[in-house]
Image: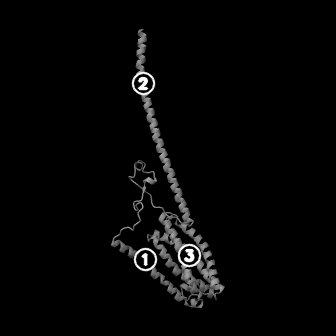
Amino acid sequence: MRLLLLLTAAGSALQRPMATLRQTAHGLAAKTVAREDATTSRLLALEAERRELQARLAANEERQRALALGKDVEPKPPRVLKKSASASCEASPTVWSDECDIDYDVEDNAPALAPDESTTEFLLGAASRGSWLVGLLAAQSLSSLVLEANEVVIQKHPVIVFFLTMLVGAGGNAGNQAAVRVIRGLAVGAVVPGENGASFVLREARMALVLAAALSVVGYCRVVAFTANTSSTEALAVAASLFLIVALSIVLGAALPIFLEKINAGASNAATTIQVVMDVSGVLITCAVCGYLLDGTSPLSVLLPGVGG
């Protein structure tokens, strides 16, 4: 009987530690499950963020390819993380979503306003732009010197005068077109001087050959079909001049914004600069090509009067 009582007491004593162990094990299991749930949630959030970043990267690459192909690409406004938009933004500040984005410069449904500036800032801006325009005006006046030096060729072949504005205008248009596309690429970060700028210039050089060839054919047909008393040689001279002017203007129009950006002169000045450059160089090219094809004079005589007359 005593033995039975002792065994019963021992069993009761062992049940209490076992119950404690079972409770501890259950508590540890619950904590482990909670940690696993938290880890899973975090992994899901990171995976969603990874997919979001991949989508953004793919969209950016697509925009760069479209820009390289010459398509119109409008830059999107920068996405700024809202610091205290909601609890979810504070809890996961690295996860970008529409509710965490805000544009601090433009309010919702509000028209864009010009930034306030002082009189000093306005005058400094006017001085900067004015000095650039004065320099371009002085450079553009060089075309009159070229025309004066080639007065004999112009008087002998009036077709040069008839189509000179068309030639220099086509050069300015083509150069401006290339410059604007590169300036847009610089603005959206698709073109980076020193990294991929050369590849964009090479791409525009190939485009220059295609466009120059097409425009020269159109120019030749224009001279032959709509101009009386014009020989085929004169039409060929105009077409050849047009080819060289357009090809040069596109290459310069693509390279000039990158160069100006690299020397911190402002890529936005490339559009006006290329117009003036092509006005002067267009007159030079036209007089040189027409003088060589029509009269057999050396192209150097345009730059150095009296040489190879």
Marks 2/3: CA–CA distance: 91 Å
Q: Quadrant of the C terminus?
A: bottom right
Would residue 164 be visible to someone looking at this image?
yes
Image quadrant of residue 238? Answer: bottom right
Q: Name the outermost residue toward the left.
A: 119
Q: Secondary structure at mark 1?
A: helix
Q: Considering depth in this image, is 21 or 300 the residue closer to the camera?
A: 21
Where is residue 216? Give x, y as percent.
61, 78
Depicted 306 relative to depicted 191: above or below: below
- Disc ID at residue 112: none
Marks 2/1: CA–CA distance: 90 Å
Q: Amino acid at mark 3?
A: Leu
Q: Which circle's residue, 2 or 1, is located before the other in the chain?
A: 2
What residue is rendered at 40% in x and 19% in y? 13
Where is residue 132? Give x, y as percent.
43, 77
- Disc ID at residue 19: 2
* Residue 108 shown left or right of residue 199 in the figure: left
Please name the residue that numbered disc 3 is placed on: 248
Q: Amino acid at mark 1?
A: Trp
Q: Quadrant of the N terminus?
A: top left
Depicted 83 relative to depicted 227: above or below: above
Where is residue 286? Give x, y as percent.
57, 83
Eye-nearest disc, 2 or 1: 2
Q: Secondary structure at mark 3?
A: helix
Q: Are marks 3 and 1 in contact (CB under 8 Å)?
A: no
Eye-nearest disc, 2 or 3: 2
Q: Considering depth in this image, is 69 or 266 the residue closer to the camera?
A: 69
Dot 3 crowding, Cα within 10 Å, few <14, some 14–19, many 20+ = many
Image quadrant of residue 202? Answer: bottom right
Please name the residue that numbered disc 1 is placed on: 132
* Residue 27 shown left or right of residue 178 in the figure: left
Depicted 265 relative to depicted 156: above or below: above
